[in-house]
């Protein structure tokens, strides 16, 4: 089954995205990079909405690198979500394989529209 994985260490961001998406899509959540990577490898979501700055063993960029370097997961569509708004941050995420980059605070409607366009 195709689903969206939301990864953010802040429960309020996960909840906002989940509420915005759950009427149309199956949504799962993870609060850290290690869990996100394990879930991606095991369940293979269609899309991952991935926070850049997370505490713990892996931040979002490290998770992105691991997903895009693994032949089993590299086809997962990944959108980064970050408070880092500099062009260099966006460019670095794209260079590493991110499919989109949303800056906090983001418009949930914009994220939903982007997800819709990538779920087919």
Image: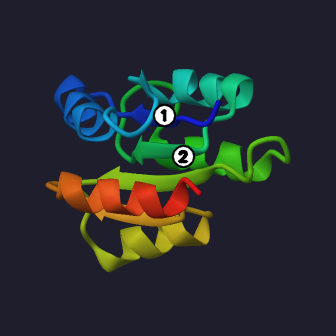
Locate residue 16 relative to residue 101 in the image: left or right: left
Locate residue 63 relative to residue 24 in the image: left or right: right
Badge 2 marks a residue whose secondary structure is strand
Residue 22, compared with residue 69, is above or below; it is: above
Name the residue: 61% across, 64% down.
Answer: 96
Badge 1 marks a residue whose secondary structure is strand
Q: Quadrant of residue 8?
A: top left
Name the residue: 19% across, 35% down.
Answer: 16
Closer to the camera, 23 or 65? 23
How far apart, in angstroms, are the residues tagged by discs 2 and 1?
6 Å
Look at the numbered discs 2 and 1 and tell me whether their residues touch, using CB distance below 8 Å: yes
Closer to the camera, 68 or 6? 6
Closer to the camera, 1 or 52? 1
Residue 107, horizontal then vertical, whole percent: 17, 58
Name the residue: 22% across, 28% down.
Answer: 15
**Quarter of the image where the C terminus is located:** bottom right
10 Å crowding of disc 2: few (<14), some (14-19), many (20+): many
Residue 71, horizontal then vertical, whole percent: 85, 47
Say which residue label 1 marks: 5
Say which residue label 2 marks: 47
Name the residue: 53% across, 65% down.
Answer: 99
Residue 21, horizontal then vertical, whole percent: 32, 40
Closer to the camera, 85 or 101? 101
10 Å crowding of disc 1: few (<14), some (14-19), many (20+): many
Residue 71, compared with residue 102, is above or below; it is: above
Residue 14, horizontal then vertical, whole percent: 28, 31
- Residue 95 numbered tag: none
Q: Earlier in the sequence, mark 2 or mark 1?
A: 1
**Quarter of the image where the N terminus is located:** top right
């Amino acid at each position: 089954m195709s689903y969206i994985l939301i990864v953010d260490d802040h429960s309020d961001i996960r909840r906002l995205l989940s509420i915005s998406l759950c009427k149309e899509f199956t949504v799962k959540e993870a609060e850290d990079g290690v869990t996100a990577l394990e879930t991606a490898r095991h369940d293979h979501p269609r899309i991952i909405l991935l926070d850049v700055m997370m505490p713990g063993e892996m931040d979002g960029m490290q998770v992105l690198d691991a997903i895009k370097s693994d032949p089993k997961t590299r086809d997962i569509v990944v959108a980064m979500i970050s408070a880092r708004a500099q062009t260099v941050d966006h460019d670095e995420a794209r260079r590493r394989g991110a499919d989109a980059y949303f800056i906090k605070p983001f418009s949930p409607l914009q994220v939903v529209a982007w997800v819709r366009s990538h779920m087919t």
